[in-house]
Amino acid sequence: MPELVFFSGTMDCGKSTLALQIEHNRSARGLEGLIFARNDRAGAGKLSSRLGLVTRAFEVADGLDFYAHLVDRLSQGGRADYVIVDEAQFLTPEQVDQLARVVDDLGLDVFAFGITTDFRTRLFPGSQRLVELADRIEVLQVEALCWCGARATHNARTVGGHMVVEGAQVVVGDVNQAADEVGYEVLCRRHHRRRMTAASARAGALSPDVLPLDSDSAVGTLERS
Ligand SMILES: Nc1ncnc2c1ncn2[C@@H]1O[C@H](COP(=O)(O)OP(=O)(O)O)[C@@H](O)[C@H]1O
Ligand SMILES: Cc1cn([C@H]2C[C@H](O)[C@@H](COP(=O)(O)O)O2)c(=O)[nH]c1=O
């Protein structure tokens, strides 16, 4: 049975790498996939992984109708055995409905890859629709880790390493950005709630406010409280 599968996880957990591996394994067996991406960091018309692999992809525009695109292609004698969509969080809900129709009416497997939630922990509209419609949701097995060592479950947006909570939902970017740039960092929920990134944790550890200068002053504080 063809399926709509949503491969999800935080940023930097290997989604694009897996998309490229699925593509590689299927094309090695003579199958032909249609690869789509939207707002890939490497630029328009690309699907790229941080491991250095990159392949060409159709850039998804707001107005793209996946179902009509596939029907056009097949009715003109073109071939498509499966569909891969990376950065699927950026799809519109209507486009996810079209992907479900590609599975049900055209009998193709559709593999969608994306993060579920934004820097404010809210579902992206495309991801919400994927959660609602997918036959299967696969959470990536290579866990990204928070700076504390716990499993990272949330994406933080950072400026100068510090977490921000205001701004547009979509800002294309990467983890490990230079200090003055807008970037992202994956965190466990506890540290996302406390807005504690690696940089703020380091700053906190160095601050005299949280580290008593000597044991006497620490005891004094306890006695007074
Ligand atoms: N230098 C490296 N050596 C080994 N693995 C790496 C290296 N750089 C990145 N990775 C792996 O690639 C993953 C990111 O892959 P990518 O497909 O770009 O992630 P996603 O699409 O989920 O954002 C990292 O979690 C890590 O496992
Ligand atoms: C959390 C969050 C992320 N984004 C952007 C940043 C990246 O360009 C992509 C995620 O790419 P990845 O391959 O999964 O690392 O999404 C965004 O626009 N808004 C956000 O809140």
Image (cartoon, grey):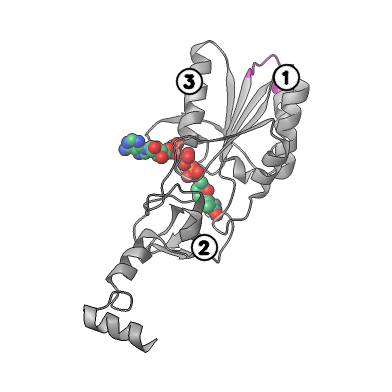
Dot 1: element: loop
The amino acid type of the residue labelled 1 equals: Gly
Q: Is residue 49 left or right of residue 213?
A: right
Q: Is residue 77 magenta?
A: yes
The amino acid type of the residue labelled 2 equals: Arg
Q: CA distance from mark 3 to mark 2?
A: 39 Å
Q: CA distance from mark 1 to mark 3?
A: 21 Å
The residue that mark 2 highlights is: 193
The part of the chain drawn in magenta is 73-81
The image position of residue 162, as x and y in percent, is 41, 65
First in sequence: mark 1 vs mark 3:
3
Above or below for 107 versus 201: above
Which image quarter holds the C terminus? bottom left
Front tag of 3 and 2: 2
The residue that mark 3 highlights is: 24
The amino acid type of the residue labelled 3 equals: His
The image position of residue 116, as x and y in percent, is 59, 46
